[in-house]
Image (cartoon, rainbow, N blue to C red):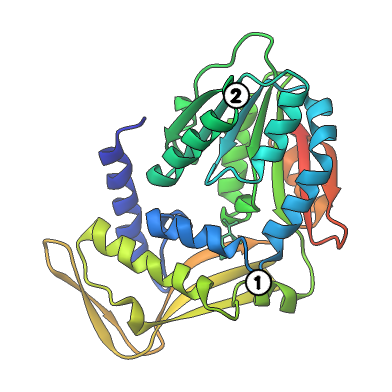
Amino acid sequence: RLDPGALRERLAEEALAGLLREPLRELPAKLLYDERGARLYERITTLPEYYPARCERAILNRRAPAIAAQTDASEIVELGAGSAEKTRALLYALAGRSRLRRYVGLDVSAEMLEQTARALVTAFPDLRVHALIADYERDLAAIPPPEPSAPRLFTFLGGTIGNLELAARARLFGELRALMRPCDRLLVGIDLVKDPSVIERAYNDATGVTAEFNRNVLLHVNRLLGCNFDPQAFDHRAFYDPQRSWIEMRLRARRDLQVTLGRERRQLKFAAGDEIRTETSAKFRLEAFADELGGTGLALEASWRDQQGLFALVLARP
Ligand code: AVI
């Protein structure tokens, strides 16, 4: 367990820096995952429009035995563990080969991770479970050292790699590469480039769960920075940018408003229509993604797509 106070302080610093950024205010996407945000994201993964979760689940359910055989892993280290719901297919496949010994999950959502860890201990009584309340962009050093001759599978599922920009992705892959021994592997879920209307529908669902997930970031920021955002004063927007191959979520002020920040009572002014970017979610072409991996010393070993070709799982080796 990392010091929760230190993690919170870092999130607060990043939130403040983002709100003061010009010309476009920006909050880091990880702020979307306080306890309520993590639950809302779980609901998003069950929505009919949100194809990434459905497609990734289908690939995992179908390919878990092949991935287990190919990696021969006895340990999973999961970045952004969340509910680890889809990871279970892998865990069952590895347990079926009597190889599974340890699961290490990292997440910034403490409550969700604790629940996940408890559920895994119940479902897999022989599994040793480590739950690290940590930010995978900064805290990889907290991962317990590997056991000798126990191959590790690092997993980064859900398409979350797309929530990092190019330089941050390279940094993360480089750090993972440094942790990996020749026997270790990395499994990454990537959302693929496709008809933008399909992507935009997934981030503008009919029931408004994604809008609620987006607005919830302001409640989290209120707690972190002691400010008074009214989430209802902002509209949810999500649109695809073909130049950057990403969809971005923004919050747009419905009217002129002021927000008071922290103990210093600094005023943040918004004119009607002013926006805060709250997330970018990149969509990839497999070849370009393989090049990105290559640039950090990792090599694509295998990849699997769902039947519609919307999403892919990529297995990389050092
Ligand atoms: C976690 N991450 C991969 C999701 C995504 O699609 O970028 C978060 C999300 N944002 C809106 N809906 C879901």
> Left or right of 315: which side holds 308?
right
> Left or right of 217: which side holds 70?
right
Please name the residue that numbered disc 2 is placed on. 179
Residues under labels 2 and 1: Cα distance? 34 Å
Q: Secondary structure at mark 2?
A: helix
Q: Does the image show residue 277? A: no
Residue at point 82% right, 33% down? 65
Mark 2 Cα shell of 10 Å, populated few (<14), some (14-19), many (≥20): some
Which residue is most to the top? Answer: 148
* Above or below, comparing residue 286 to residue 46 in the picture: above
Residue 157: % across, % down:
65, 46
| Amino acid type indicated by mark 2 | Leu
| Amino acid type indicated by mark 1 | Ala
Q: Does the image show residue 306? A: yes
* Above or below, comparing residue 236 to residue 146 in the picture: below
Residue 301: % across, % down:
84, 34
Rendered-image quarter of ligand 1:
bottom right
Rendered image quadrant of residue 88: top right
> Left or right of 58: which side holds 241?
left
Rendered image quadrant of residue 231: bottom left
The C terminus: image quadrant: top right
Please name the residue that numbered disc 1 is placed on. 202
Q: Nearer the viewer, residue 301 or 220?
A: 220
Label 2 or label 1, whichever lies nearer to me, is 1
Residue at point 68% right, 20% down? 74
